[in-house]
Image (cartoon, helix red, strand yellow):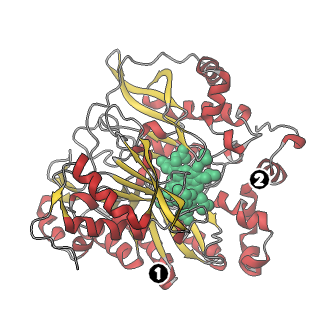
């Protein structure tokens, strides 16, 4: 079980975790619903509720955010309908965002409704447990697992089994609710690294050893305001069935030995730095009770990354998957009902989410494709968006997040719409917005990454961005670097236009005339 340092050394987060486990608030939900958000103990309200996926939002007090778990980014139409019904209740204040971890977050949620919402989640197999704070976040897997003709390993059962181990099948698992910090796991099953494996604390990457297909293991990838690192090889190879036990062993080593004194230096990589990767590996082997075979000489990432937008034949004859572009991942209740309906009417009800904040409808028979493509929702969520919007990603930003230094989602959409009118482009350019250095919008994996900051212009403080470039995804992924600092957002469109023309082959759109 968890061993934590003596109380004198504890920072305030370690102290409140040691006093009362985050999961303990499960038993208080009815009471919280009755007394209302203003009367709840502040640490329970602002911190511990996050262990259940319930986030107090200082920007919208009283209207909470609910972060789900979507193993491998997959949900059913019934689950989507349930989430739509929850969101619909809150009218204009309700919406949902597809996140950069293939997940959904609902907004506008009132605490008094939580007990009933959780009952409904249970009925349809949904959970939000352990999705925030010092827990393992949504586990990502190939978004086309099980339906991709070129897939190497079906990641779905592995992701589900790992989530079940960590959360006690959604009931909550105190074994893993007091980690030193958040923790990310990704399981890649295809050749295109569709989950950004390299930015996770543990990443499983397909690799053959002696003709057996398994995974090479990477550890320690993370982004934070203080430091960003790509994951490094553990020099270990495992068969797929060992994924769960290895994840458990790594988590136990991290839980029991991870650095807890300074929250800015608590992610897994800091422990690996302190110990060296050899000692870390040996400790994991000890915890596992067996030696780990050394890594296979090469991994199987050898494609450019796919975005899955458009229509694609599945490995099952006569079936297709259809990837829809959801601008910056933002959904409203009517969109969610429609997605659920389309998945049910045209497919087998399955909806999948991607780390680019888009959605895929799976298992559509050839005979129903034409009718699906004629549905009005596909005008809003296109299968063929213009190259600039196509690869746009954005974090939450100041609309709902108190850390944000700038507004992101709405500004990203507006700026790209204007640039799309002015420019032609052959290939998509991946532009990622993130509202602050926490990097939830992953600007370091983008062709052009925009990170919110503040600067002075004409004697006033204004919203601005630092610009990152050179992020490469898919085979030989690498993190982008900061190339420009503090560009005021009001000047950004011109800077982006020039970058797109000079470095990405954009040209002026014939006939475009700027408004005078
Ligand atoms: Fe994040 C904190 C949103 C993916 C790094 N992140 C937050 C909080 C919870 C802060 C807060 O309480 O307001 C944000 C909630 C805002 C809101 O109301 O939506 C937030 N993070 C998000 C999401 C929703 C961005 C999005 O629009 O998609 C993503 C939710 C993923 C999920 O479903 O669980 C999200 N966050 C990420 C990622 C990307 C990833 O996982 O691939 C990162 C960088 C990778 C990493 O963690 O190593 C990321 N978020 C952070 C950090 C910096 C962590 C650190 O070690 O310092 C924070 C701040 C913190 O934890 O102290 C943070
Ligand atoms: Fe909030 Fe910053 Fe994360 Fe954006 S990057 S969601 S602004 S914490």
Q: Between disc 2 and disc 1, whose residue precedes? A: 2
Instruction: Please indicate, yes or no, whether residue 169 appears anywhere in the rendered image.
Output: no
Classify the position of ligand 1 by quadrant: top left, top right, bottom left or bottom right. bottom right
Q: Quadrant of the C terminus?
A: bottom left
Q: Residues within 10 Å of mark 2 (few under 14, many from 20)?
A: some
Q: Which residue is mark 2?
A: 21
Residue at 66% from the left image edge and 34% from the top image edge = 254
Quadrant (top left/top right/bottom left/bottom right) for the N terminus: top right
| Mark 1 surroundings: few (<14), some (14-19) or many (≥20) residues within 10 A | some
Residue 487 lies, in percent from the top left, at: 44, 57
Quadrant for residue 78, please give it.
Answer: bottom left
Q: Position of residue 5 (x, y in %)?
A: 83, 37
In this picture, is 59 found above or below 316? Answer: below
Which residue is found at the position 33% from the left and 57% from the top? 495
How many labels sit on residues? 2
Residue 52 visible in the current orientation: yes
Quick check: 302 above or below 498? above
Q: Image quarter for residue 146? A: top left
For label 1, the residue is 88
Asked which secondary structure carries label 1, the reply is helix
User: Does label 1 point to a residue whose CB lies under 8 Å from ligand 1?
Assistant: no
């Amino acid at each position: 079980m968890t061993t934590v340092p003596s109380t004198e050394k504890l920072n305030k987060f370690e102290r409140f975790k040691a006093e009362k486990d985050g999961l303990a608030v499960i038993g208080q939900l009815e009471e919280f619903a009755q007394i209302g958000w203003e009367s709840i103990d502040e640490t329970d309200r602002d911190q511990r509720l996050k262990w259940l996926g319930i986030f107090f939002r200082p920007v919208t007090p009283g209207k909470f955010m609910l972060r789900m778990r979507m193993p491998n980014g997959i949900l059913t139409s019934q689950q989507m309908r349930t989430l739509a019904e929850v969101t619909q209740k809150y009218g204009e204040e309700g919406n949902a965002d597809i996140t950069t971890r293939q997940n959904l977050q609902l907004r506008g949620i009132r605490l008094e409704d939580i007990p009933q919402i959780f009952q409904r989640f249970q009925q349809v197999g949904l959970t939000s447990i352990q999705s925030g704070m010092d827990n393992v976040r949504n586990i990502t897997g190939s978004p086309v697992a099980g339906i991709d003709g070129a897939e190497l390993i079906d990641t779905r059962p592995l992701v589900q089994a790992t989530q079940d181990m960590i959360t006690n099948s959604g009931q909550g698992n105190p074994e893993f609710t007091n980690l030193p910090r958040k923790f990310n796991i990704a399981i890649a099953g295809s050749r295109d690294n569709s989950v950004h494996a390299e930015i996770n604390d543990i990443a499983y990457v397909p690799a053959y050893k002696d003709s057996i297909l398994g995974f090479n293991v990477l550890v320690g990838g993370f982004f934070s305001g203080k430091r960003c690192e790509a994951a490094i090889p553990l020099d270990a190879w495992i068969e797929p069935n060992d994924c769960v036990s290895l994840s458990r062993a790594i988590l136990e080593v991290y839980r029991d030995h991870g650095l807890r004194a300074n929250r800015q230096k608590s992610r897994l990589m800091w422990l690996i730095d302190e110990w060296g990767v050899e000692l870390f590996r040996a400790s994991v082997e000890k915890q596992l009770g067996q030696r780990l075979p050394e890594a296979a000489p090469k991994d199987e990432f050898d494609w450019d990354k796919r975005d899955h937008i458009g229509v694609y034949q599945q490995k099952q004859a006569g079936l297709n998957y259809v990837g829809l572009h959801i601008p910056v991942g933002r959904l409203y209740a009517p969109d969610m009902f429609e997605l659920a309906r389309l998945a049910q009417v045209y497919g087998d009800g399955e909806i999948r989410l991607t780390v680019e904040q888009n959605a895929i409808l799976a298992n559509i028979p050839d005979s129903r494709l034409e009718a699906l493509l004629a549905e009005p929702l596909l005008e809003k969520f296109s299968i063929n968006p213009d190259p600039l919007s196509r690869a746009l990603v954005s974090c939450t930003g100041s609309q709902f997040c108190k850390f944000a230094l700038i507004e992101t989602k709405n500004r990203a959409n507006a700026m790209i719409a204007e640039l799309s009118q002015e420019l032609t482009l052959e290939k998509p350019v991946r532009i990622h917005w993130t509202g602050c250095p926490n990097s939830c919008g992953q600007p370091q994996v983008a062709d052009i990454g925009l990170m919110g900051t503040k600067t002075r212009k004409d004697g006033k403080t204004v919203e601005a961005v630092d610009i990152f470039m050179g992020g490469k995804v898919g085979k030989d992924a690498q993190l982008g670097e900061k190339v420009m600092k503090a560009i005021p957002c009001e000047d950004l469109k011109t800077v982006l236009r020039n970058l797109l023309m000079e470095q990405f082959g954009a040209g002026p759109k014939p006939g475009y005339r700027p408004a005078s």
